[in-house]
Amino acid sequence: MKKLILLAAIFVLAAPPESFAQAARRESIALQHGAHRIGKRADAEMQRWREHGLGQFIHWGVYAIPGGHWEGEYYAGAAEWIRSWSGIPNEAYDNLYKQFDPVDFDARQWARQARDMGVKYLIFTTKHHDGFCLWPSRYTKYTVAGSPYGKDIVGQIVDAYTAEGIDVHLYFSIIDWNHRGYRSARPETAEQRAAYEEFKTFTRNQLVELLTRYPAVKGLWFDGSWDAAWIAEAAWVDALGTELRAMHPGLVIGSRFRADEFGNRHYDANGDLIDDYDQTWERSLPENFAQTNGVDWDCVMTVPENQWGYHSDWRGYVKTPYDLLEMLVRAVSMNGNFVVNFGPDGRGNIRPEETYIAAEMGAWMRRNGEAIYGCSHVAQMKQQGWGYFTGKNTDKGKRVYMTVFNRPLDNHLRVEIERGAALPSRAYFLDGGAEVEFVDGGRNKHNNRLLRFVIPDNFDSGGKPFVVVLEFDRPTDTTDESYQQART
Ligand code: FHN
């Protein structure tokens, strides 16, 4: 025991806790427009967001009409970027809305499908970079109100999804190719400055308008905020964020909204996360938990390699429901939300590939969603390549879910439990509840306990990932605490 205390004392002296180092770093740069909070938001609205696990992204706009083609030519880029393609006159694109008439659009049907898929929140494009607004904004004529369709799409979506118990977050592109004052580079001349000021006012007005029209929404998901002109407006954007939060308590905003005064995006000059969660994980996941920096984050994922809006001709690798489930569980095991993108066509139909994904993921989630919703990272347990741990504390103790994607040939799921951590009292299949036996293989050289959970030879998961639940009689430390401890 004495030896242990001595060792611990040597360790503490030799390696100052990182919190000291962080404090020193923080003191080194006084920021007015960096992170306004160190550590995670602790309020109920943010906790709700954190527990969603699975989200749906919908990219929809006039780009769904050409669907990745212009005058018969195939466009290889992301379909929602087609206006920027050199072969397309801007004027022709900007008049496409006169054909926007999605006669098959049925918000309630989309919402039901999302509910059946197990989705807990939606991110919906109110306007993308082209500037076309899916709500009748009073600040521009370039909206759905001027299209043959005429009706408010954002309103229908917010109502339908909210009615199904799905939270709605509004995607909003800062880039707006349709506004005359928008620019990417910093304004230089007085004329450019005046136009950009108009654009800023327009942007603010639209955001206030959205929160006023749709009070049920839970968050704003910003995009297209990487322009030098926007980054240079750090103080103004910060003030705008404060205004939006004040008018909509609990509003969730990710790290794509604003930069600090030194132009740092996502993480400020002191390395602290700007706003509520890290929005850098697009079409990729962290390699490991350390890469998440211990903050909240989401990952937004396309089904093909890089198509968000509707492209009628998907080429290259198209993810399967199995791929997406694997990414979902991996994200949740590292405290992230996973958001699958859908790009409906110009008539308002969800494409068959996405309908298939929704059905397959939904079938799995109905049986195994408990391993996703409200779950977080499990420290203190290591697995051996068969899949991922997710976990949650319960009234009686804690529950750890082992979601298996790679079933070992000998049917033994090996688990290493850190010394000092509790051992499970029982294990069972989440789907069906049959008991799973486990063997305590003793301790390894690190004094960690090695367990083997034995999958019966005749167990058939039908080619789908399956979940083994471990019940513990006492809860462990919360994820955050264990993460902090790991860093000291
Ligand atoms: O340029 C956009 C892209 O079209 C898409 O909307 C994605 C979604 O996260 N965001 C931008 C690229 O980061």
Image (cartoon, grey):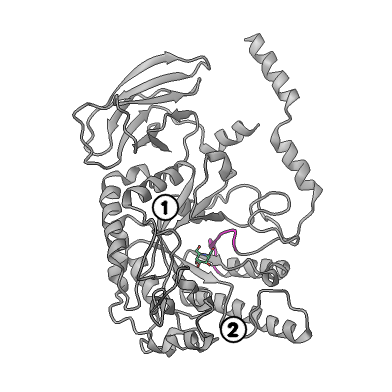
- Percent x, y for residue 189? 78, 83
Residue situated in front as seen by the camera: 262 or 309: 309
Q: Earlier in the sequence, mark 1 or mark 2?
A: 1
Image side of residue 391 versus residue 487, left or right: left
Q: Which residue lies furthest to the front in this view?
A: 73
Q: Name the residue under label 1.
A: 52
Based on the picture, tell me whether residue 126 belongs to the magenta stretch: no
- Percent x, y for residue 351? 30, 67
* Residue 179 image label: 2
Which quadrant of the view contains residue 21? top right
Q: Which of marks 1 and 2 is in front?
A: 2
Number of residue marks: 2
- Magenta segment: 248-256
Q: Which residue lies furthest to the left in this view?
A: 458
Residue lying at 51% horizontally and 36% vertically, measured from the top left: 478
Which amino acid lies under the numbered mark 1 shown in the image of this protein?
Answer: His
Quick one: label 1, few (<14), some, or many (20+) residues within 10 Å? many
Is the C terminus in the top left, top right, bottom left or bottom right quadrant? top right
* Residue 412 image label: none
Magenta stretch: helix, strand or loop mostly = loop
Secondary structure of the residue carrying tag 1 is: loop
- Percent x, y for residue 151? 37, 84
Vertical comparison of 32 with 10: above or below: below
Is the N terminus in the top left, top right, bottom left or bottom right quadrant? top right
Secondary structure of the residue carrying tag 2 is: loop
- Percent x, y for residue 446? 53, 17
Vertical comparison of 106 with 6: above or below: below
